[in-house]
Amino acid sequence: MRPTDRPDGTAGSEQPADTELADTGSLDQVTGLASAGTGTSQATRVPAPTPAPARTGMFRPAADRLAGLLASLAWLVGLRAGRPTAYRDSESGRQPEASLRPRVGHDASARPRTGEAAGLAFARLTVLPAVLVVAWLIPGLPLLLGGDFLPVPVLLISVPLAAALTVNGLRAVPAAWPRLGARDRVAPGWTAWFGLLATVAVVVGLTAWQLRESSESVIVLRDAGTYLQAGYWIAQHGSLPVPQSLSAFGGVHHGLSFASIGFLPSGSSVVPAVTSGMPMLLAAGFWAHGLTGAGAVGPILGGLAELSFAGLIARLVGPQWAPAGALILGLSLPQQYVSRSALSETALQVVLFGGLCLLADSLILRAVSRRVPRADAPAEGEAPVVVGSAVG
């Protein structure tokens, strides 16, 4: 037996003489030398001869520091690297379902399985329409009030805003949702793929059907005509209200009035009797392909509303029921009516159902982060970082 030293320099326990001492750095051999006349002994570190290729441990501290620096940088941008840790329910001590555990990083072991990949795609796809509509309307309203609702400024602001909202708002989403009445249980993996593919097929079929049966309300007889005329004016002039053109009628005449169905006089201007949200969406159709493009906005928004509704159904009762929910909504007579013309109910449905989906996801992520504590949770006083149940 002979005394050994720990890697930190402190005295360690004795090991058999025939045991090779090796650490992450260089290989050392410790020999005990007796002191003459005192009877005491002291340990002297003697480097063992090793081949040149084996002396790679001297670079390990620098590599560790570099890896730590990269991990810190990744932590700052919200992509915390590393393998997932074992998580258990703080109340029952049981491990939750794999889809409810936080999955982080780009390690092979942290990559989502096939069922989780479908769940992530389905969760993001069903809230994407609401994000895009909001990204178009938020900068569009100030530009419309300023008289600059034109293609170039709208696209320069809306496209980066949509990209920022999509990347940051949909970065952390749940890959699956708990079943009602079952604690920590999620639907099987095949249901996510079935819900994703079948819902997309149903929505595409309903949208194509509505495009074929759509009717363009060019003459103002109801709200659809008002929306279409207001959208045409916004696409051409980029401003509201519509000024009165007395010169086009030969000046002021007795009985001449600019009030009509869907438009109200306001001073020397005419104001549409509808909100400006749907006309701003119709203006994009006019810019894309004239009257035909504007006529396609209603059916497309109807299809996106059915997609968002399917996402809400998946979050409440399971993804396997999402195609049935989209089909039932699309075949209902009120939905057919509003999807075949330029009415604002479809845009309202997109924002409403998409917002409810985001609310459900946020509640699930918050519940999972509270119920499943991280093994590497920050110390007291440090701001916690909640990644979510699955990060793709």
Image (cartoon, helix red, strand yellow):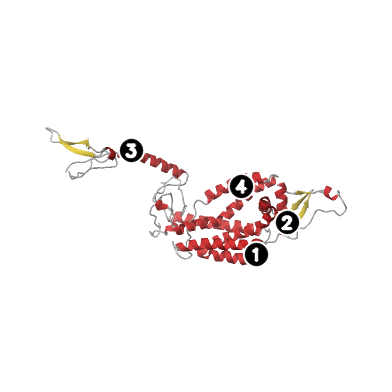
Q: Identify the disc placed on residue 226.
A: 2
Q: CA distance from mark 1 to mark 4?
A: 29 Å
The reply, left or right, for residue 267 in relation to residue 391 is: right
x 61%, y 59%: residue: 349
Q: Earlier in the sequence, mark 3 or mark 4?
A: 3
Q: CA distance from mark 3 to mark 4?
A: 49 Å
Question: Is the C-beta separation of discs 1 and 4 under 8 Å?
Answer: no
Q: CA distance from mark 1 to mark 3?
A: 69 Å
Total numbered circles: 4
Q: Earlier in the sequence, mark 1 or mark 4?
A: 4
Q: CA distance from mark 2 to mark 1?
A: 19 Å
Q: Amino acid at mark 4?
A: Ser
Q: Amino acid at mark 1?
A: Gln
Q: Amino acid at mark 3?
A: Phe
Q: Earlier in the sequence, mark 2 or mark 1?
A: 2
Circle nearer the viewer, 2 or 1: 1
CA neighbours of label 3 inside 10 A, class few (<14), some (14 to 19), many (20+): few
Q: Earlier in the sequence, mark 1 or mark 3?
A: 3
CA neighbours of label 2 inside 10 A, class few (<14), some (14 to 19), many (20+): many
Q: Position of residue 129 (x, y in %)?
A: 58, 55
> Mark 4 = which residue?
158
Q: Secondary structure at mark 1?
A: helix
Q: Using the image as rendered, state which of residue 337 and residue 263 is in the foreground.
A: 337
Q: Using the image as rendered, state which of residue 73 and residue 113 is in the foreground.
A: 113
Question: Is the C-beta separation of discs 3 and 2 under 8 Å?
Answer: no
Q: Identify the disc placed on residue 59.
A: 3
**Quadrant for the N terminus in the image:** top left
